[in-house]
Image (cartoon, rainbow, N blue to C red):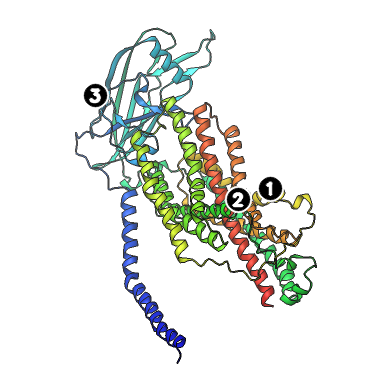
C-alpha cells in the first residue's frame, strides 16, 4: 500500500464516524427539538391568546376607557378622544398598552363615566361646562365629518357618533345637533361581562348651530342585562358574518378551482402530447449535430447561461422566499385562532417579529443562489438584499409617520415605539439576515447543477413578435393569478382599510394556495412559449411574469380607493397608497420568486430529459 492509498484508508473511517455521530446527534436531539418547538408554540399561544377574563362582584368598578375619535370615512385618521372639547375627568390616567396596541394607534385613557358591576343608572351627569366659540366650531367641524368615537368596556369595543347635522333646513342654514345622553347596555353571565355597547339617545340632543359661547350638560345611564352566552363566545358578534358574502367567497373559490383545473389539464395534455414526443425524437448527439436548427430543443447550450444582474435577481428571490415563509407562518397562527377579533395588536406584533425573524430565510436563499451563479462579492449582495427588504418600508414609514405627526393623529408612533422598532431591526432582523447569508456561504456548494453546459458563443435570438415580448407577457401572466383572488381582495381591503374584521383564515389559506399554483402554471407555460420562440433569456422574464400579479393588485388598490371608498384628506391618501405600494411590492417579489423557481424546475426537467434520452 502506497502513501496515497494509506492516507485515503485512514480518512475513510473518520468520515464514517462523523456521519455516524451526526445521525446519533439527530436521534438524540430530535425529540428535544420537537419538545422545544412545542414549548415555543405554547408560549406564542399564551402571548397572543385570550385569557380567562376578569371576574367581578356586585359593586366592583368596571374598567371603562375612551380610545379615539375620527372621521368615519377615513379609518386611518384617528385622534385622541380628549382632543375634542368633551367631558373629561379631573385626572386623566393613561392605560398601559402593549407594543401591538401602540402600533395599531390605540390611545386608551380613563373615561368620565363610572360603571359599577350590576348597578343600574338612569341619569347620571357626566359634566357641566361652558365651551367657547372656537370649541363650538371644532365640534361643528367634527360633526360635519361624521366623527365617531370608540370606547372599551372590559376589553370590549363600543362605538358611537358624536352628533348629527343637516345639510340645510327651511332657511338653508346647516343644523348641528350634539348627543347629550349616552346609554350603556352591558350583558353579563354570572360574574363575567359578555357584551357591551353604547347608544346615543335620539331625543336628547343639543343645538350647536349658533357660533357663540354655549353651556352644555352631558349625562349617561347604565343598564345591566343577564345573558346565557358563555365568555368564550363574546367576541363572535364582531366577526363579519354575512350569508351573501360567505356564498360569494365559496363561489369564488369554486370558480378559481375550476380555472386552475382547466389550466393544469391543458398544460398536462400539451406536455404529454408534444413535449414528451420531442424527448423521444432527440438526444444530446442530435442537438450537437443540428445546433443551427430551430426550436426550444436546440437552446440546450444557451438556456443555462447566467443572467445579467445576477446579484439583483438573487436579492429579489431571497426577499420573495422570506415573504412566502412569513405569509405561511401568519396563516398558521390565524388558523390556530391566535388573532382574535378587534385584537389588531396581536396581528401587527406577529407581523413585526415574523418579518424580522424570517430575514434569515432571505439571507440564506439569496446568498445560496448568488454563489451558485458564481457570484463573488457576497457582502455587496447581502447589503443589496437589506436595502430591498427594509428600504421601501423605511421610506414609507418615515413619510407616513411625519405626516401623522403633523396632523397630531394617533397613527404617529411614540418615540418609545419607534426606538423598539429600530432596536428590533438592528439587533434581530439585520443580524439574522447576515447569519443566513453566512450559513449559505459555508454550507452550500458553489456550483450550479445544470444538465447542459453553456457554449462559449451565445445563440442569436431571432426577431420576436410584439406580443411575445416582456411587457405583453407580464400583462397576460398577471391577469389569471389576479382574477382567482380579486374577490377575496375586497374582503381583505375592507378589513385592512375599513371597520370589518377578517376571520376567515381557512378561506384565505385556500386562496393563497390557489394563487401560488396558478402563478406556477402560468409562468411555466409562458416560459415554455418563450423557449419555443428560441428566446433563451428566461431568467428575468420568468420572475417578471410571475411577479406581475403584484402590479395588478396595486392597480386594484387605485380602483378600490376611488370607486369603493369615501376616503379624503392627505393623511388617508398617504397611508393608503404608501402601505399598499409596499404590500404590492412584496407580492411582486414573492410571486416572482414562485414563478422563477417553478420555471427553473421545469427547464431543468425538460433539458435533463433530452440529455438522458
Q: Callout 3: 10 Å neighbours few (<14), some, many (20+)?
A: few
The residue positioned 68% from the left and 75% from the top of the image is 611
Q: Position of residue 388 (x, y in %)?
A: 52, 47
Disc with the residue nearer the chain's start (2 vs 3) = 3
Q: Does residue 263 appear left or right of residue 332 in this picture?
A: right
User: Does 458 appear above or below 404?
Assistant: below
Asked whether the residues under the numbered discs 2 and 3 touch, taking CB atoms below 8 Å apart as contact, a structural biologist would say no
Quarter of the figure with the C terminus: bottom right
The residue positioned 37% from the left and 8% from the top of the image is 213
The residue positioned 46% from the left and 35% from the top of the image is 398
- The label number, if any, that marks residue 547 in the structure image: 2
- The residue pinned by badge 3 equals 91
Q: Nearer the viewer, residue 352 or 299?
A: 299
Q: Callout 2: 10 Å neighbours few (<14), some, many (20+)?
A: many
Asked whether the residues under the numbered discs 2 and 1 touch, taking CB atoms below 8 Å apart as contact, a structural biologist would say no
Quarter of the figure with the N terminus: bottom left
- Furthest toward the bottom, the residue is 1
The answer to whether any part of residue 5 appears in the image is yes
Disc with the residue nearer the chain's start (1 vs 3) = 3
Residues at marks 2 and 1, CA–CA distance in whole angstroms? 10 Å
- The residue pinned by badge 1 equals 475
Amino acid at each position: 500500500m502506497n502513501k496515497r492509498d494509506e492516507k485515503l484508508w485512514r480518512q475513510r473511517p473518520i468520515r464514517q464516524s462523523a456521519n455516524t455521530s451526526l445521525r446519533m446527534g439527530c436521534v438524540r436531539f430530535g425529540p428535544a427539538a420537537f419538545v422545544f418547538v412545542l414549548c415555543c408554540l405554547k408560549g406564542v399561544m399564551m402571548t397572543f391568546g385570550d385569557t380567562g377574563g376578569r371576574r367581578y362582584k356586585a359593586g366592583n368598578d368596571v374598567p371603562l376607557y375612551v380610545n379615539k375619535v375620527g372621521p368615519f370615512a377615513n379609518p386611518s385618521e384617528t385622534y385622541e378622544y380628549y382632543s375634542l372639547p368633551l367631558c373629561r375627568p379631573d385626572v386623566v390616567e393613561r392605560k398601559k398598552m402593549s407594543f401591538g396596541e401602540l402600533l395599531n394607534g390605540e390611545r386608551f385613557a380613563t373615561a368620565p363615566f363610572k360603571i359599577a358591576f350590576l348597578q343600574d343608572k338612569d341619569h347620571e351627569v357626566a359634566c357641566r361646562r361652558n365651551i367657547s366659540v372656537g370649541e363650538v366650531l371644532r365640534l361643528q367641524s367634527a360633526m360635519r365629518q361624521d366623527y365617531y368615537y370608540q370606547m372599551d368596556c372590559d376589553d370590549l369595543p363600543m362605538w358611537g357618533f358624536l352628533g348629527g347635522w343637516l345639510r340645510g333646513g327651511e332657511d338653508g342654514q346647516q343644523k348641528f345637533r350634539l348627543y347629550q345622553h349616552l346609554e350603556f347596555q352591558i350583558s353579563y353571565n354570572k360574574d363575567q361581562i359578555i357584551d357591551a355597547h353604547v347608544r346615543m339617545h335620539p331625543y336628547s340632543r343639543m343645538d350647536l348651530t349658533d357660533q357663540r359661547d354655549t353651556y352644555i350638560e352631558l349625562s349617561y345611564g347604565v343598564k345591566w342585562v343577564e345573558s346565557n352566552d358563555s365568555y368564550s363566545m363574546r367576541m363572535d358578534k364582531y366577526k363579519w358574518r354575512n350569508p351573501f358574502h360567505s356564498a360569494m367567497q365559496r363561489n369564488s373559490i369554486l370558480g378559481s378551482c375550476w380555472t386552475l383545473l382547466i389550466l393544469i389539464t391543458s398544460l398536462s395534455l400539451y406536455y404529454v402530447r408534444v413535449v414528451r414526443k420531442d424527448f423521444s425524437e432527440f438526444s444530446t448527439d442530435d442537438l450537437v449535430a443540428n445546433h443551427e436548427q430551430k426550436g426550444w430543443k436546440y437552446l440546450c447550450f444557451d438556456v443555462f447561461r447566467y443572467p445579467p444582474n445576477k446579484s439583483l435577481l438573487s436579492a429579489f428571490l431571497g426577499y420573495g422566499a422570506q415573504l412566502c415563509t412569513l405569509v405561511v407562518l401568519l396563516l398558521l397562527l390565524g388558523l390556530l385562532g391566535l388573532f382574535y377579533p378587534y385584537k389588531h395588536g396581536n396581528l401587527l406584533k406577529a407581523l413585526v417579529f415574523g418579518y424580522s425573524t424570517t430575514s434569515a430565510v432571505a439571507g440564506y436563499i439569496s446568498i445560496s443562489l448568488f454563489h451558485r451563479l458564481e457570484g463573488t462579492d457576497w457582502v455587496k449582495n447581502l447589503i443589496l438584499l437589506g436595502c430591498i427588504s427594509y428600504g421601501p418600508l423605511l421610506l414609507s414609514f418615515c413619510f407616513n409617520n411625519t405626516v401623522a405627526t403633523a396632523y397630531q393623529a394617533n397613527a404617529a408612533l411614540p418615540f418609545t415605539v419607534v426606538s423598539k422598532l429600530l432596536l428590533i431591526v438592528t439587533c434581530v432582523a439585520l443580524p439574522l439576515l447576515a447569519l443566513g447569508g453566512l450559513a449559505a456561504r459555508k454550507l452550500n456548494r458553489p456550483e450550479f447543477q445544470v444538465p447542459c453546459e453553456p457554449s462559449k458563443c451565445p445563440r442569436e435570438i431571432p426577431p420576436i413578435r410584439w406580443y411575445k415580448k416582456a411587457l405583453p407577457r407580464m400583462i397576460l401572466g398577471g391577469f389569471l393569478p389576479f382574477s382567482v383572488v380579486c374577490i377575496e381582495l375586497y374582503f381583505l381591503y375592507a378589513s385592512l382599510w375599513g371597520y370589518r374584521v377578517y376571520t376567515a383564515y381557512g378561506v384565505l389559506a385556500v386562496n393563497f394556495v390557489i394563487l401560488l399554483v396558478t402563478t406556477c402554471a402560468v409562468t411555466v407555460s409562458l416560459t415554455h412559449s418563450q423557449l419555443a420562440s428560441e428566446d433563451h433569456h428566461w431568467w428575468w422574464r420568468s420572475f417578471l411574469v410571475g411577479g406581475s400579479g403584484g402590479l395588478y393588485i396595486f392597480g386594484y388598490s387605485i380602483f378600490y380607493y376611488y370607486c369603493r371608498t369615501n376616503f379624503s384628506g392627505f393623511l388617508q391618501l398617504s397611508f393608503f397608497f404608501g402601505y399598499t405600494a409596499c404590500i404590492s411590492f412584496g407580492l411582486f417579489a414573492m410571486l416572482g420568486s414562485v414563478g422563477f423557481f417553478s420555471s427553473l424546475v421545469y427547464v431543468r426537467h425538460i433539458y435533463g430529459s433530452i440529455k438522458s434520452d
